[in-house]
Image (tube, rainbow, N blue to C red):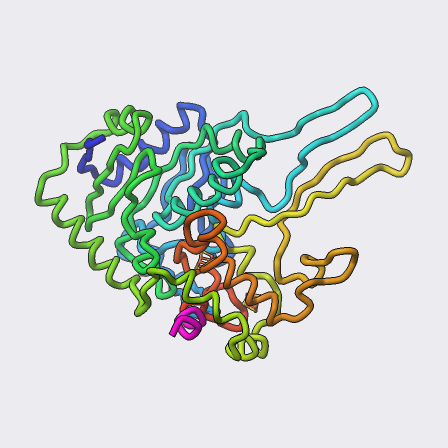
Amino acid sequence: MSLVKLTGEEELIRLIKLLSERGYKLIGPVLQEGVILYKEVGRDYRFPKGLKEIQGKGYYRVFKGGEGYFSYVHGFYSPKHFLHPPTETLLKLEPSLKQDTAIGSEPLALIGIRACDIKALFILDDIFINRNSHPDEHYKRRREGIFIVGVNCVYTGDTCFCGTMGTGPFIEEGYDVSITEIGEVFLIRAGSERGKEIVEQLRGEEASDEHLKKERELIEKARERTKIDMDITGLHQKLLPKLESPLWDDIEKRCLACGSCTMVCPTCFCYEVRDEITLDGSSSTRIRSWDVCFREGFSAIHGIPIRSTIKARYRQWLMHKFSYWVYQFGTYGCVGCGRCITWCPVGIDIREEVKKLAS
Ligand code: SF4
Ligand code: SF4
């Protein structure tokens, strides 16, 4: 799939129209209440231009003054919100009706998705479909029709560490169309047959070697910025003997067990399922909602929590991401998006905690 076109900004508008004409429900980055979020948008959607985002430990601000269309990375929403939504009705039962309410008929086009979040989708695919002896039909149906328009990160956030986790900033796979912004122009690349069909419709010339070289240079600079001083080779094994480290006591003094980190994480997948039955017994609704391992009751068996301290719950979260996940699913559970650092109200930085534990 080697089609790469050099286009101008008007072709970004055309790209959206082409997707809309093919019946996709469009989800794109939108500035709302001071955060850039992925939201449903219409066929007249324009990528927000001139925005700049600053992310730090427990800090997020959006400003005007960005140099182009993609001088930010992401807010707290990730593709997870659309494929494994925070709450959904799985089933509605009435005496004469058994209705499976899984959403899935309307294919989604996820627009402006970054490399780390595409890797996170692969992780969710393993959990819900590929490594699951009972594939999740709700997730699977949404996932099947999805069209991904990725953006290669030339700008990076200060909490990003995809360069270390090997998940970005360039999108290698899992996309239909990708965009790289190079000054005033864009390289639009096809990553699938469906993507190729769209890219062929766009006006522009085939990208020159010079533009491809410029793209590589920008991406390499971005990759360097997202590398931290940590080698992840064998990290899952290095962490295992650290279960009784005094560092967990130190984290307990700071962590609020609010669970914000799990909510924003693009790979956290835990959920609870409950039945809501009307008092007269005429109907019952089965609802699935995200659950959080920082909740005391999360680990309760017969009402008794297994992880009754915050220290135990934080340890479970970090060790799952960077150690147990590898044994369960064959990859780390972290893609280095940095959201848990940005959106932690007390600024706990998972990069620092892992580095301290691994040293
Ligand atoms: S690490 Fe931060 S975001 Fe996560 S539960 Fe603790 S205080 Fe909340
Ligand atoms: S653990 Fe933190 S940095 Fe890693 S994927 Fe989750 S939110 Fe992103």
Q: Which residues are magenta?
A: 352-359
Viewer-side residue, 318 vs 301: 301
Residue 196 location in percent, x, y? 27, 27
Q: Which image quadrant: the C terminus?
A: bottom left
Residue 328 location in percent, x, y? 49, 49
Residue at 42% across, 34% down: 109
Would residue 143 be counted in the magenta stretch? no
Determine the main secondary structure of the stretch shown in magenta.
helix
Label count reads 0
Quadrant of picture, ligand 1: bottom right
Q: Is residue 267 above or below residue 89?
A: below
Which residue sits furthest top? 96
Residue 206, quarter of the rendered image: top left
Residue 230, quarter of the rendered image: bottom left
Residue at 66% across, 71% down: 309
For residue 129, side relative to residue 156 (left or right): right
Residue 220 location in percent, x, y? 20, 56
Q: Is residue 164 above or below residue 229?
A: above
Q: Is residue 354 above or below residue 99?
A: below
Residue 70 location in percent, x, y? 31, 51
Q: Which image quadrant: the N terminus?
A: top left
Viewer-side residue, 173 vs 279: 173
Residue at 48% across, 43% down: 124
